[in-house]
Image (tube, rainbow, N blue to C red):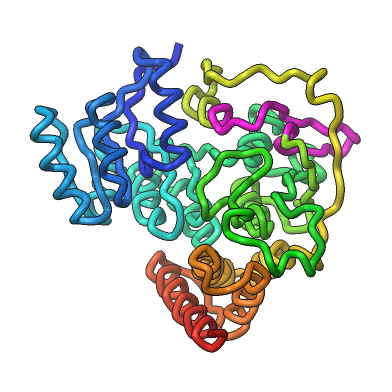
């Protein structure tokens, strides 16, 4: 029986945060929500505060916090409303919080995730950018402060489940030959290169298997999401780039695989539902009920696999390139991608311009060594500036 765990959920109004609260609500005797945070979705936050009555509710935007504070008082709730990045860091490192779900999307989630690791918490990592932009220094913080790091991405969680239970961080000692990182291929897996020029944000966000936010849905459509996951896998499992192979698997039933030197391939299977990896991490090392529909292999009937097409989806290759260069290159890649995706969603440039913007930014911004979080944020800022300049020229 797992002890009562005290949670801070960073990004509680997003898809991962909502699914986390769904799992938590199924186990009121095992989990207590201490703090919830969000960017500006104050109405959703109010609803969550009414149900879970956290001690703290943090809004990144001050105006959203002011509105929430008024409504919290009117509802007679004891929740204290805070705002700003410093407050996010504060609730991520509270002394009586032992587990932090890091689910803020984008670079905004880095500082509070670092704060949680620096305080030695059990960090459930759904924020890709922390490892993509600052992998080496974040892993150092985790080790130095004896934090526990558990991945929430379905793919990395599947890899963790397919590795030996006593995995020490050395693939060679564990007899692992390579990691097979599965990808659905997104909504445009079979679309021609010419047809990709005319796709709309609505089409890009219509993922065939997963219910996700807009940004990650577009990343899936460009396969940048898988590129970022390659970088994450490198840091999480100390895997060389050549030990990480991306495999297109349209059904999204096998979430990833681990191949061993004896020829064995172990896979984690399940319906495409983020509550599975969330429940795995929340209960780890035990298993807890997640509310997920059991997998019906007869209904699935078949499992298909194919190689990714680099000509139609160059973002995957750009991510491998950034990983090979190292230093600030992944941070530059990530920042340019965030600007590109936002611009596409606002219909300021076509879908096919996303990799073009990223590649140009990677070539324009000088790569540097990364020693501190300040270095990471500086690279992020320079890349965003260069990407916006490229967009202005495009217009």
Using the image, determine if residue 360 lies above or below residue 261.
below
Question: Is residue 272 positioned above or below 206 on the image?
Answer: above
Image quadrant where residue 258 sits: top right
Q: Depth check: 351 or 354 in front?
A: 351
Q: Percent from the top left, x then y, of residue 324?
A: 69, 68
- Which residue is situated farthest in the bottom direction here? 393
Quadrant housing the N terminus: top left
Q: Which residues are magenta?
A: 253-277
Q: Residue at x 37, y 40 (%)?
A: 13
Residue at 54% over, 88% down? 393
Above or below: residue 99 compared with residue 334: above
Is 270 a magenta residue? yes
Residue at the spot 64% in from the left edge and 49% down from the top edge: 233
Is residue 45 a member of the stretch shown in magenta? no
The percent position of residue 167, horizontal first and vertical second, equals: 65, 34
Answer with left or right where residue 249 lies relative to residue 5: right
Q: Quadrant of residue 107?
A: bottom left
Residue 146 lies, in percent from the top left, at 43, 40
Residue at point 90%, 35% (across, down): 263
271 sits left or right of 307 in the view: left
* Left or right for 258, reference 151: right
Whether residue 334 is visible, yes or no, is yes
């Amino acid at each position: 029986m797992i002890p009562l765990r005290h949670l801070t959920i960073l990004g509680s109004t997003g898809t991962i945060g909502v699914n986390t609260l769904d799992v938590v609500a199924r186990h009121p005797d095992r989990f207590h929500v201490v703090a919830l945070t969000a960017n500006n979705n104050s109405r959703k936050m109010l609803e969550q505060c009414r149900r879970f009555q956290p001690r703290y509710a943090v809004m990144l935007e001050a105006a959203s916090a002011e509105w929430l504070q008024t409504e919290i008082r009117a509802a007679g709730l004891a929740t204290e409303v805070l705002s700003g990045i410093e407050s996010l860091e504060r609730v991520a490192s509270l002394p009586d919080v032992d587990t932090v779900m890091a689910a803020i999307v984008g670079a905004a989630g880095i500082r509070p995730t670092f704060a949680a690791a620096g305080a030695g918490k059990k960090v459930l990592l759904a924020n890709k950018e922390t490892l993509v932009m600052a992998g080496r220094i974040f892993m150092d913080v985790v080790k130095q402060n004896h934090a526990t790091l558990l991945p929430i991405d379905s793919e990395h969680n599947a890899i963790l489940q397919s590795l030996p239970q006593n995995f020490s961080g050395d693939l060679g000692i564990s007899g692992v030959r390579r990691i097979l990182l599965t990808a659905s291929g997104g909504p445009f897996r079979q679309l021609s290169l010419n047809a990709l020029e005319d796709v709309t944000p609505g089409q890009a966000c219509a993922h065939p298997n997963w219910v996700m936010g807009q940004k990650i849905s577009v990343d899936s459509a460009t396969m940048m999401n898988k590129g970022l996951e390659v970088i994450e896998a490198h840091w999480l499992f100390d895997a060389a780039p050549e030990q990480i192979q991306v495999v297109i698997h349209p059904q999204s039933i096998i979430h990833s695989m681990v191949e061993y030197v004896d020829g064995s391939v172990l896979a984690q299977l399940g319906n495409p539902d983020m509550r599975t990896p969330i429940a795995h991490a929340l209960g780890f090392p035990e298993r807890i009920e997640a509310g997920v529909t059991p997998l019906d292999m007869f209904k699935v009937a078949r499992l298909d696999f194919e190689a990714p097409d680099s000509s139609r989806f160059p973002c995957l290759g750009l991510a491998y390139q950034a990983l090979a260069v190292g230093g600030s290159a992944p941070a530059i890649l990530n920042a340019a991608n965030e600007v590109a995706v936002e611009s596409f969603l606002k219909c300021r440039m076509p879908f096919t311009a996303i990799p073009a913007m990223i590649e140009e930014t990677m070539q324009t911004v000088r790569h540097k060594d990364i020693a501190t979080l300040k270095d990471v944020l500086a690279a992020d800022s320079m890349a965003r500036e260069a990407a916006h300049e490229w967009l202005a020229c495009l217009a």
